[in-house]
Image (cartoon, rainbow, N blue to C red):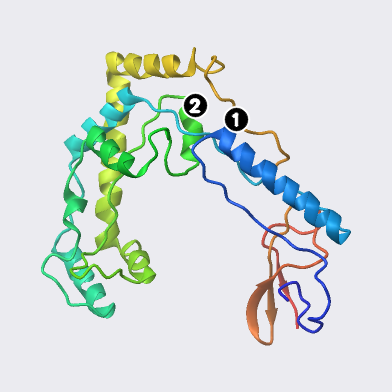
Amino acid sequence: LTGGHATADNLPAGLAEIQYMIRVPTLAMAEQVTTVLDRNAEAAAGMSGCRHERHWVSKSRPGLANHAMAEIAYEAMSTAGPPRWDEDAKAVAREIQVNAGRMASDEPFIEELERLIEPQAAEAILRRDLAPSQVNSTSDDYTDMSWHTPTARFYVARPALRSETGYPYPAWVMNALGGISATIDPMVICASKTVALAALRLLEDQTARDAAMNEFVARTGGGIGGSNWIAPLCDYEPPIGFRWPEYVTTPRGRDWWIPSNQTPQTTSRGASHDRS
């Protein structure tokens, strides 16, 4: 029905699309998953007399640890200090608590937001919920950079509200806290100071630079191109041929749709048209 067939809903769709996101600890696991998906697609197409296509949008490598960089980042964060939310931020938070149907509290933010935790302690907490054999956790695209230069990942707490009863807040609360300067700026400022201090340390401290690079070379088996180095996963066509929405103005107002005859050569990104 979403393909424009709402006036003929008894017709089979001419095109079916399924998008998958895979999050697994290793590349071997990802390859196992895609092998099964390929077999399923071939079987479905064969049974229905159709053809199938596979398009990759993105692949990212697992992260490469660097303990020397992690220590540099944590020392920088310790110097900068954790984020602090002032009374203006707390007033906003209390208002959100009330609007979410809760009681306003004297200290609306979670206490742990303003407390530093050492990397080793954080790692121990994280691994409580991981299989002993699992090396990597979570998913992001920054991990690709860790194969080209010594890299550290650090977390700065974003504003989050206490819930005395354990009842979760609705999703709009997180969005609101992330869009109001009084509540989100402490996180951004803390992160900015940490990055700046770590960068200055690396610029000025030859010993720190050497330690980070030596660990990078050791973990990759010789640096970029080394025996343990993973090259960029670019074994697919770039996803540049997909259609872009067309913005239209009709008597009903401004809206958008994806035109059926659009090709990358005929329509630019987000082209705007007037239609009556």
Counting residues from the start of the chain, the first of labels 1 and 2 encountered is 2
In percent of width and height, residue 199 lies at 32, 29
Q: Is residue 222 above or below residue 71?
A: above
Total labels: the figure holds 2
Quadrant in the picture for residue 250: bottom right
Quadrant in the picture for residue 81: top left
Which of the two residues, 126 or 194, is positioned nearer the viewer here? 126
Side of 263 where 249 appears, left or right? left
Residue at the image position 34 percent from the left and 14 percent from the top: 210
Residue lying furthest bottom: 251
- Quadrant in the picture for the N terminus: bottom right
Tag 2 residue: 147
State the SS at label 2. helix
State the SS at label 1. loop
Label 1 packing within 10 angstroms: few (<14), some (14-19), many (20+):
few
The label shown at residue 79 is none
In percent of width and height, residue 223 lies at 49, 16
Q: Is residue 68 above or below residue 86?
A: above
- Quadrant in the picture for the C terminus: bottom right
Residue at the image position 82 percent from the left and 81 percent from the top: 10
The label shown at residue 232 is 1
CA gap, disc 1 and disc 2: 9 Å
Residue at the image position 74 percent from the left and 46 percent from the top: 39
Side of 111 where 257 appears, left or right? right
Asked whether disc 1 touches disc 2, contact meaning CB atoms under 8 Å apart, the reply is yes
In percent of width and height, residue 93 lies at 22, 68
- Disc 2 marks a residue whose amino acid type is Trp
